[in-house]
Image: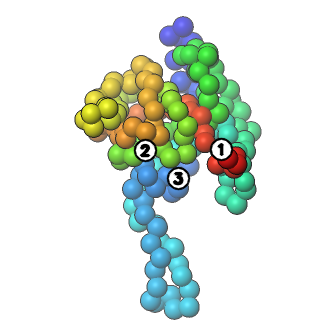
Amino acid sequence: MEDKLQEYFDIVMTFKMRSNNHRHNVSGIKEIRQYGKHIGTDKWVKVGNPIKSQNFGLVRKFKLAGLHPSNYNTKHPDIYEALKQIINILDPTFEYDGITVNKNVEALPHRDSNNNGISLIIGFGSYTGGGLYVEENDGSFKLHDINHKPLYFNGSTQTHYTEQFSGTRWTIIYYKLKNRDKKG
């Protein structure tokens, strides 16, 4: 089982990820409206560093209501299939509709406001450190080693963040998305 899992991790590690400016809660990137020398315009300026983070499965798309398949599902079918095989090995009964792949992301303390319920995260690659701090019921934080060790936690109610690391650290998070379009 471990050999097959590593085979799928190796496929995911071939993914040439683009930079992502949209995960403000994780990266710390802020959008600032700038006035002045751009008289008559309101130019948005990104402050901070983009991260390597992409979503597969279902996503919320700008200007469209509801949840929709990520474009990455069809642009990178080999990666998407490997991600589905990984969760089938780790926990075939785990229910998810969203998948996030991160490369070398040192997440700031945050909660996942778009998630609903329990998430499963696993780390892989060649790195040291890089555990996940997760908030406990008493408000303290516990450090979890996630390198080839799946961790279940509620990312929408428990603040969490990444321990500093060195090397190349990949993570995959499986989760259910809130469908904000439901009435009632």
| Residue 172 visible to an observer of this rendering | no
| Residue 139 visible to an observer of this rendering | yes
Q: Nearer the viewer, mark 1 or mark 3?
A: 1
Q: Residue at x 51, y 57 (%)?
A: 21
How many residues crowd mark 2 within 10 Å: few (<14), some (14–19), many (20+)?
some
Above or below, 117 relative to 40: above
**Pointer 2 residue:** 111
Distance of label 1 from label 3 (alpha carbons)? 23 Å
Mark 1 or mark 3: name the one nearer the start of the chain: 3
Above or below, 5 relative to 39: above
Distance of label 2 from label 1 (alpha carbons)? 17 Å
Q: Residue at x 54, y 82 (%)?
A: 42
Q: Position of residue 46 (x, y in %)?
A: 46, 66
How many residues crowd mark 3 within 10 Å: few (<14), some (14–19), many (20+)?
some
Q: Nearer the viewer, residue 23 or 71?
A: 23
Say what secondary structure mark 2 lies in.
loop
**Pointer 3 residue:** 20
Give the residue type at disc 3.
Asn
**Pointer 1 residue:** 179
Q: Quadrant of the N terminus?
A: top right
Say what secondary structure mark 3 lies in.
strand
Horizontally, residue 28 falls left or right of residue 98, namely left
Residue contact between numbered discs 2 and 1, judged by CB atoms under 8 Å = no
How many residues crowd mark 1 within 10 Å: few (<14), some (14–19), many (20+)?
some
Give the residue type at disc 2.
Arg
Mark 2 or mark 3: name the one nearer the start of the chain: 3
Above or below, 10 relative to 157: above
Q: Position of residue 171 (x, y in %)?
A: 47, 32
Quadrant of the rendered structure where residue 116 is?
A: top right
Q: Position of residue 117 (x, y in %)?
A: 53, 33
Give the residue type at disc 1.
Asn
* Number of numbered callouts drawn: 3
